[in-house]
Image (spheres, helix red, strand yellow):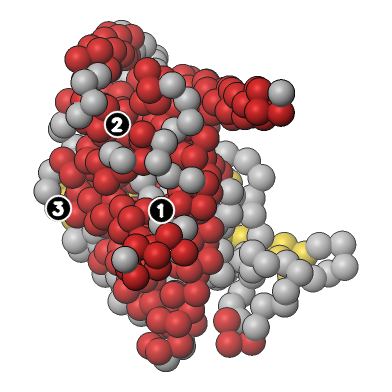
């Protein structure tokens, strides 16, 4: 009896907290068991879908889910990264990583709980639709707002080659999130005798999506092109990268022998801001002319504002065979590492780093027969940026990255996201790193070339346009409309109940 009274006094939070941690466990282990456990992510909520959870209980579920995913899946490698990048002790880095997990992940998870609270207050026949819509909208919102990191991504748990990935090609990663959550809800409602009707609807929707995405249009992009990428095997910190310029040049001599359309060096390959370093410009132009191949390379860009304050950009440059210089500035920056996200609060001295300014537009690098849509490091996680360059006629996505400080777990997360970018654009992805792995993904997210050092050469065939390039955003708008309609229905029902009770 004492335990029952204690449970009631806490608002019955123990069960939703346990459900949140269990759902987090299912998400974390999914990539290691062929993605299957992701389809059970809503199973711990079987009782809650019968309207047994109150709002505070849903908030507890969401917060527990978000914090558990962050602590178990991200804090260990995030602490290592913070230690390497800012030079903090391991104890301080771990404490900072835990604070980020408790605030960002906890707050984000609680938001999911609030959205589910509304989604489960509709009639059972609609509940699968509203819960799937809420979860899909929540995932998309996390990626659209600072810190822009898809730290919880159901589609990223699925390996290349599973048949339901066709949904990503049709309507983006959000479509697969919707399908995974819907399937999980169907399992729950199936326990209540509604599996047949729900499963039939889900099957019809899947077949329709696959059929609609099949006739993807082939763009007129010729016979493809060949790229050669150089991985110098850098293992230094970001503060002394670039001293390996000679190594890049030496490895490039072998890379240009097959006469590729373009030569690629990774993020941070250049030792200084190429746009103002005349000596470096002259050196690279002479190299490019001798090789007869254009060069794309990552480096900084420097310019001054109206008050003569230096402004740095994380950039990618193209030096073509005519000696012309063009560049792309990274648009989506990494919080803490490249900019300070909490503007009302001054950046503390112990987290000091060089601030980077965001760019303001996409770039297609045209070199030889290649048209490469440029993305830098963290931008490979951003679906909207990938779709933007695809709409502008890119033949492939080019992702330049600096992995010298990234733990292996962080690299795995980035590659999982790049598989989704390939699927939802219909373009191959060329990932060029300075410390491996460099790789090429085909338009179905499958790794076709993997290079851990030195030179990687790849032929990129003409690309097929995935339907998701144009349908992913309308799909998310539809999901948002479903969720707004859910809230309106809940509010109207509550007002009707109050009026009835007052009579």
Q: Are marks 3 and 2 in contact (CB under 8 Å)?
A: no
Q: Check disc 2: other Cα within 10 Å, few if <14, some if 14-19, many if 20+.
A: many
Report the residue at 38% width, 88% height from top.
90
Specify whether 355 is left or right of 456.
Answer: right
Give the CA distance from mark 3 to mark 1.
Answer: 24 Å
Q: Nearer the viewer, mark 3 or mark 1?
A: 1
Number of the label disc, if any, that sits on residue 26: none
Give the CA distance from mark 3 to mark 2.
Answer: 22 Å
Number of the label disc, if any, that sits on residue 185: 2
Residue at the disc numbered 1: 61
Quadrant for the C terminus, please. Answer: top right
Towards the viewer: 317 or 250: 317
Q: Secondary structure at mark 2?
A: helix
Q: In this rendering, is residue 402 above or below 258?
A: below
Q: Secondary structure at mark 3?
A: helix
Report the residue at 52% width, 46% height from top.
55
Tell me, yes or no, if residue 443 can be seen here. Answer: no
Q: Earlier in the sequence, mark 3 or mark 1?
A: 3
Q: In this rendering, is residue 429 above or below 277?
A: above
Number of the label disc, if any, that sits on residue 32: 3
Q: In this rendering, is residue 40 above or below 221?
A: below
Q: Secondary structure at mark 1?
A: helix
Q: Earlier in the sequence, mark 3 or mark 2?
A: 3
Residue 79, x across and y down, in percent: 39, 77
Q: Nearer the viewer, mark 3 or mark 2?
A: 2
Residue 19, x across and y down, in percent: 31, 53
Residue 385, x across and y down, in percent: 51, 39
């Amino acid at each position: 009896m004492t335990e029952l009274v204690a449970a009631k006094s806490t608002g019955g939070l123990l069960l939703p907290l346990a459900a949140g941690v269990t759902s987090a466990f299912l998400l974390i282990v999914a990539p290691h068991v062929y993605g299957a456990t992701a389809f059970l992510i809503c199973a711990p909520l079987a009782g809650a879908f019968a309207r047994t959870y109150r709002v505070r209980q849903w908030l507890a579920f969401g917060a527990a889910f978000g914090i558990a995913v962050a602590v178990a899946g991200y804090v260990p490698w995030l602490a290592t990264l913070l230690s390497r990048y800012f030079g903090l002790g391991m104890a301080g880095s771990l404490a900072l990583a835990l604070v980020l997990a408790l605030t960002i992940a906890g707050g984000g998870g609680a938001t999911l709980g609030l959205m589910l609270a509304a989604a489960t207050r509709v009639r059972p026949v609609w509940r699968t639709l509203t819960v799937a819509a809420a979860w899909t909208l929540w995932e998309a919102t996390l990626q659209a707002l600072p810190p822009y990191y898809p730290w919880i991504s159901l589609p990223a748990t699925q390996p290349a080659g599973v048949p339901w990935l066709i949904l990503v090609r049709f309507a983006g990663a959000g479509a697969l999130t919707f399908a995974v959550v819907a399937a999980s809800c169907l399992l729950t409602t199936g326990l209540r005798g509604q599996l047949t009707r729900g499963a039939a609807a889900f099957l019809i929707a899947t077949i329709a999506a696959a059929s609609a995405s099949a006739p993807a249009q082939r763009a007129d992009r010729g016979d493809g092109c060949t790229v050669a990428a150089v991985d110098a095997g850098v293992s230094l910190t970001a503060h002394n990268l670039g001293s390996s310029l000679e190594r890049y040049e030496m490895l490039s001599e072998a890379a240009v022998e097959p006469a590729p359309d373009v030569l690629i060096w990774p993020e941070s390959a250049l030792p200084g801001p190429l746009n103002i370093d005349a000596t470096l410009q002259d050196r690279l132009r002479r190299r490019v002319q001798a090789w007869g191949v254009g060069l794309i390379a990552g480096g900084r860009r420097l310019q001054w504002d109206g008050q003569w304050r230096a402004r740095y950009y994380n950039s990618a440059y193209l030096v073509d065979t005519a000696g012309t210089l063009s560049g792309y500035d990274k648009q989506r920056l990494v919080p803490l590492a490249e900019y300070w996200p909490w503007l009302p609060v001054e950046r503390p001295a112990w987290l000091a780093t060089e601030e980077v300014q965001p760019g303001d537009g996409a770039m297609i690098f045209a070199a030889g027969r290649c048209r490469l849509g440029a993305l830098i490091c963290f931008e490979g996680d951003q679906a909207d940026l990938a779709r933007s360059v695809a709409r502008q006629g890119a033949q492939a996505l080019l992702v330049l990255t600096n992995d010298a400080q990234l733990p292996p777990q962080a690299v795995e997360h980035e590659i999982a996201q790049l598989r989704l970018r390939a699927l939802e654009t219909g373009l191959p992805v060329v990932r060029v790193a300075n410390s491996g792995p460099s790789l090429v993904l085909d338009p179905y997210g499958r790794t076709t070339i993997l290079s851990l050092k030195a030179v990687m050469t790849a032929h990129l065939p003409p690309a097929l346009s995935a339907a998701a390039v144009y349908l992913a955003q309308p799909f998310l708008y539809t999901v948002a409309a479903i969720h707004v309609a859910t809230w309106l229905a809940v509010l109207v029902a509550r007002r009707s109940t109050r009026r009835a009770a007052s009579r």
